[in-house]
Image (cartoon, rainbow, N blue to C red):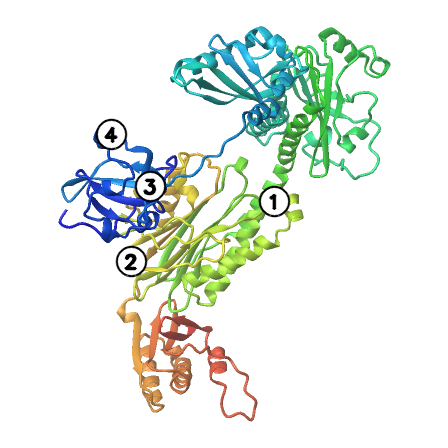
Amino acid sequence: MDAPRQRCDPPASAGPHEPFDASSDAAAVVDTAGVVLGWSRAAEALLGRPAAEVVGRPAARLLDTPVNPLRAASVAERCRSGMGWSGVAALRHRDGHRLDVDLRVSASFAIGGGECFLLSAREGRERWTMDPSVLDGFLVRSPVGMAVVDRDLRFVWLNDTLERIGGVPRDQRLGRRLSELLPGLEAEPLEGMMRKVLETGAPVTDHEYGGWSWADPYRRRAWSTSFFPLVDADGTVTGVCYMVLDVTERWNARQLLSLVNEAGTRVGTTLDVMRTAQELADFAVPRFADFVVVDLLEHVLSTEGHGTWLTDAGPAPARAVMRRAGLRSVREGCPEAVGRLGDRVDFLPPPHDARLLIDGEPVLLPVLDPADELWVTQQPERAERLRAFGLHSLICVPMRARNTVLGLTTFMRSVNPVSFQPDDVLPARELVARAALCVDNARRYTREHSAAVTLQRSLLPQALKGGTALEVASSYLPADPRGGVGGDWFDVIPLSGARVGLVVGDVVGHGITAAATMGRLRTAVQTLADMELPPDELLAHLDDLVLRLSEEMTDDEAARQSSAAFLGATCLYAVYDPVGRTCTMARAGHPPPVVVAPDGRVSFPEPPAGPPLGLGGMAFEAATIELAENSLLGLYTDGLVEGGDRDMEHGMARLAEALSRPEPDLRKLCTSAVRRLLPDPQPDDVALLLARTHGLGADHVASWDVPADPAAVAELRGLATRQVADWGLDELVMTTELIVSELVTNAIRYAEPPVRLRLLRDSRLTCEVSDASSTAPRLRHARSTDEGGRGLFLVAQLAHRWGARYTATGKVIWAEQEIP
C-alpha cells in the first residue's frame, strides 16, 4: 500500500449462516506484519480508540493478553487457504477495561500488492442456559413423538407422545426394534434410513409414509418422520434420534387434491357425452372403487332436447328413466352389471326414489346386505349380483350441473376389503361434480357452438376496402370445433386525408361471450377511428372500454355462461398515410406486424409492445415506419404463428417464408399462407390481414401556405379552383371554391399560424386546412338575424363528410367530396 487508510469500508455479509454482520460489527484491516491498515467507525465505538491512534501501528497493542506466535501463524495459514477463522479474543478498551469479543478473521486478500486480512468483532454476550429438568420435561411432553435408538436400532428412550401414537407401551418398546413392534408400518425402509444416517451422519427430514398402528388399527394414518445422528464429544455417532408427527389430515387432503386434479386431465377430454361418462368410470376403477356405473337421463343423451329436470322444479317423476352411459369393473367383462352400455335402467338404491336426483346429496351405504328385504323386493336381480360378487359397500352421487339434473353415478367395492367411509364421500362428490360439468358442457356444446359461429360470422367485415392507398385481402380460419369459437377479428377503416386504418385483435376466451365482445370492440374501434384518434390514444380508450366490460360481468352472469368470464384482449392498430408513405402503429400485447419489401426482404418492425387491453393504468406508445411503394404489410393473430409447437419465433420465420413468395394475387397469397402454416385444424382462431401499399403521387397532391391576411382568401380560392379544374373535376369547382373559402377564412380569423391549405385527389377530393391551434371546431346553427356563424354549416351541406383531427403541432379540418 502507498499509505495507511484512515477508514475501512465493511464488505458484504459473509453469508446467511455467519454470526457476524459486517455492516454493523467493528472491522479492521491488518497486514501480514500485524500492522493496522484500516479502522472502521464501529471499531472506534467498540474500543474507544479513534483511527489516528490505531492505523499504522501494531494490532497487538489492542490485545489484553500477550500474542501467541504459533497460534497467530496457524490462524494466518488457515485464512490463506480460503477458510477463514472464528473465535474469542480479549481486547483492551481505551479506558483500560478488558473486553471479551467474538472475533472473525476473513480469508486473505491483496491490497496494493500486499497480503491483508479483514477482522470483524462484536462484544461477546452471555449465553442463555436451561435447567436440565426443563429440557427433560419438554422432551417428554412435546406434541411431537421422539425416540432414540442405538447403533443396533433398538429403542433406548422415547417420549409419551410417541408411546401414544404407536399404541405400544414404553416397557415393551425399550430394547426392541421398530420392525419387531409395528409390522403395519414401512418398518424396513425406515430402518434403512436409520442405517444410512449412522453411516453418513447426514440427517433425513420430513419423510412421509402411511400405514396402521396399534393405537388406531382400523384407520390408515400418515406420519412425517425425521432422523438425525447423535454425536458424542469425540465426534462418534452413537445412535439416531427420530421425530414423528401425525400428518393424516394433510396427507388425505393432498391425496384428494391429487385425485381430483388427475381427474381433471382424464375426464372430459372430448365433447361427447357418452365418452365423458365412460372416462369417469375408467378413471375411478381401481383408484377409488372396484365397480362403477354412470347412468344419465334420456334427456341428456337426446339430440333433440337439453334436459328438463331442474333442481328447483318441484316434485320429481315417480321413475327416473335413464340409460347406461359408463361402465367399468376390476373384473373383465363387468359381470356385476345388470344393464349394459346403452340399456335403459332405473336403478336407485333402496329406499330412495327419483327425488334423490333432485336433492343431490350423496348416499353412503358402508355395508351392503344382499339379504335386506328392500333389496330383495325392489332390486332382486341386483341383490343376487351383490351376493355373487361380494359387493359390500356403496356410494351413489347424483350428477348435477348448472341447476340441471343429469343422472347418477354409483361406486361399489368388492375386491378392496375396506368399506367406504364418510371421508370417501367428498372425493366421490368431487369426481362426479367435475364429470357432470363436462357432460353438461358437451350437452350444451352443439347449440352454443352453432349460435356462436353464426354471431361471429355476422360481426366480421363482409367486404374490405382500402381505397387507392391499399390493396387488401384477408383470411380467417375458425378453430377446431372442439376448441370453441374464438374472438379473433380484423378490420379496414377508411380515414380522412386518403389514409387507411388497419386493425387486428384477439379476445381472450372462446364461445358466445368472446364473439360478442369481439363485435363490441370492433364497433368501438370504428367509432374511435372515426374520431381521428392517433393509434396510441385509440388503444388507451379501448383499454378503458375493456375494463368497463370486465366490471359489467357479474359473478352470476359468469356462472351462467359455459365459457370463462371475459378478461381482456390484444390489439394492433395501424394508420397508413399514402402521401408520406408512412405507417404509424401501436399495439396492446399483440404480435408485431410483418413487412415484405418490394425486393422480397422480410422484417418484423416492433413498436412498443404495450400491455394487453383490460389491465389499465399503463400507457401505450406509437411508432412510425416508412413503407416503399408496393410493400406488403401483414397483421395477424397469435394462432397463426404459434402452431402446434407453441414456438412463436419459429412460426414468425415460417410466416416470413410464406409471404416472401412472389404472388401478384393478394387473395391467393393470403389463403395459401394460412393453409401452409396451419394444414390441420387448430385450437384457436386464426386471422391474417394483408395490405399492399400504394403511394399518392405528387400529381395528386397540391398545397399552399396561407398568409395571416384575410385578403389572401381570394387568391387561395383561385389557386384551389384552378387545381381542381386541372384534375378534370369541373363539376366540383364551385363547391370546392366555397369550401376552401369558408375553411381558410375561419383559420385566418380564429386559428394560430402557420396555416396551410392542401388538396388531395384520391377516391374522393379532400380539402384540408391545418393550423397550430388545438381548439375544436363547432358546428353552429345561426339565427336569421346573425351576420355570421354559417361557415361550417355550409361546409357540412356541401361536403360528403367533414371533420377534424389533431396532430402534434395543432389540428387539421378536412372536408371530402365524392368524385362524379
* Above or below, 662 relative to 374: below
Q: Amino acid at mark 3?
A: Ala
Q: Is residue 820 visible?
A: no
Which numbered mark, 4 or 2, is in the foreground of this view?
4
Extreme residue in the front direction: 96
- What is the x, y in percent for residue 422? 72, 24
Is tag 4's residue or tag 3's residue first in the polypeptide sequence?
A: 4
Q: Position of residue 364 (x, y in %)?
A: 75, 22
Which of 25/726 is in front? 25
Residue at the image position 60 percent from the left and 8 percent from the top: 181
Q: In this figure, which residue is indicated by the disc labeled 3? A: 121
Whole-percent x, y for residue 612 in the image: 46, 51
Nearest to the eye among marks 1 and 2: give it.
2
Sequence order check: which comes first, mark 1 or mark 2? Answer: 1
| Closer to viewer: mark 1 or mark 4 | 4
**Above or below — where is 585 with respect to 717?**
above
Mark identifier at residue 71:
4
Marks 4 and 3 close (CB-CB < 8 Å): no
Mark in front: 2 vs 3: 3
Label whose residue precedes the other's in the sequence (1 or 4): 4
Cα gap from disc 2 to disc 3, whole angstroms:
69 Å
Q: Which residue is mark 1?
A: 451
**Mark earlier in primary sequence (4, 2):** 4
Neighbours of disc 1 within 10 Å: few (<14), some (14-19), many (20+): some
- Front in this rendered view, residue 61 or 518: 61
Residue that numbered label 2 is attached to: 627
Element under label 1? helix
Q: Nearer the viewer, mark 4 or mark 3?
A: 4
Disc 2, disc 3: CB below 8 Å?
Answer: no
User: Circle 4 — which element?
Assistant: helix
Quadrant of the frame with the C terminus = bottom left
Cα gap from disc 1 to disc 2, whole angstroms: 41 Å
